[in-house]
């Protein structure tokens, strides 16, 4: 359930706090983007400089006061406030009422259902609070872990986009996934109990 303190958005689930990024997240963001396993399928070249991390973070902080807001970047934390990952909705479109879901988690927290749990919270936020009609996600065809997450949260594979992702100097294929508002709302109970 979302709580708003001014312009800061906080979302909670059974085990997680998902909160708008702020300056306190800089060290975590910088460290997370230096982990090769986390960046393995990333299209964004992250040179590893603190300046790049500051720019990345500032983009999301600036969006918190934008009208309309097109980017939502959140820190995923455990109940004890330990940060474990990042998640967000990008390219939010008022006209088409859609957005793109993305996520990344520190490897020591993989395989514990945290990404599914956080993604379900973001879907609920997108459909019920932002009134989105459609939430999409793209994933490299080799990224089986992220594909499993997208399918567990009810997203449907809509197609293959050939050689669209520039990853480490190569063009990679991408599966395109999406979930419609009515699909999520009609199956919300099933989704929220299947993490």
Image (cartoon, grey):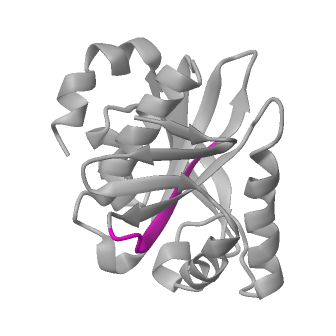
Residue 158 appears in view: no
Q: Is residue 84 magenta?
A: yes
- Which quadrant of the figure has residue 109? bottom left
Q: Position of residue 184 (x, y in %)?
A: 36, 21
Q: Residue 23 placed where, x, y %?
A: 70, 70
| Quadrant of residue 31 within the rendered picture | bottom right
Q: Is residue 90 above or below residue 184?
A: below
Q: How far across and down, in percent of the image, does residue 192 sit?
A: 23, 34
Boundaries of the magenta span: 80-89
- Quadrant in which the N terminus is drawn: top left
Q: Residue at x 83, y 39 (%)?
A: 66
Q: Is residue 111 above or below residue 97?
A: below
Residue 69 appears in the figure: yes
Query: Residue 24 sits in which quadrant?
Result: bottom right
Extreme front residue here? 5
Q: Is residue 79 above or below residue 83?
A: above
Of the pair 79 and 147, the residue shown nearer to us: 79
| Residue 95 image position (x, y, % from top left) | 75, 15
Predominant secondary structure in magenta? strand
């Amino acid at each position: 359930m979302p709580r708003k303190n001014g312009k800061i958005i906080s979302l909670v689930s059974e085990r997680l706090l998902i909160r708008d990024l702020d300056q306190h997240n800089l060290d975590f963001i910088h460290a997370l983007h230096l982990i090769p396993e986390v960046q393995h399928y990333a299209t964004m070249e992250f040179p590893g400089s603190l300046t790049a991390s500051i720019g990345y973070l500032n983009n999301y902080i600036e969006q918190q006061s934008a009208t309309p807001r097109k980017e939502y970047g959140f820190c995923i934390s455990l109940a004890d406030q330990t940060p474990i990952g990042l998640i967000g909705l990008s390219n939010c479109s008022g006209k088409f009422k859609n957005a793109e879901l993305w996520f990344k988690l520190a490897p020591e927290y993989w395989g514990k259902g945290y990404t599914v749990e956080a993604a379900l919270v973001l879907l609920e936020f997108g459909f019920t609070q932002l009134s989105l009609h459609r939430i999409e996600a793209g994933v490299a065809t080799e990224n089986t872990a992220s594909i499993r997450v997208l399918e567990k949260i009810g997203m449907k594979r809509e197609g293959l986009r050939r050689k669209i992702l520039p990853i480490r100097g190569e063009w990679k294929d991408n599966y395109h996934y999406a979930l419609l508002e009515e699909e999520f709302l009609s199956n919300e109970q099933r989704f929220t109990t299947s993490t």
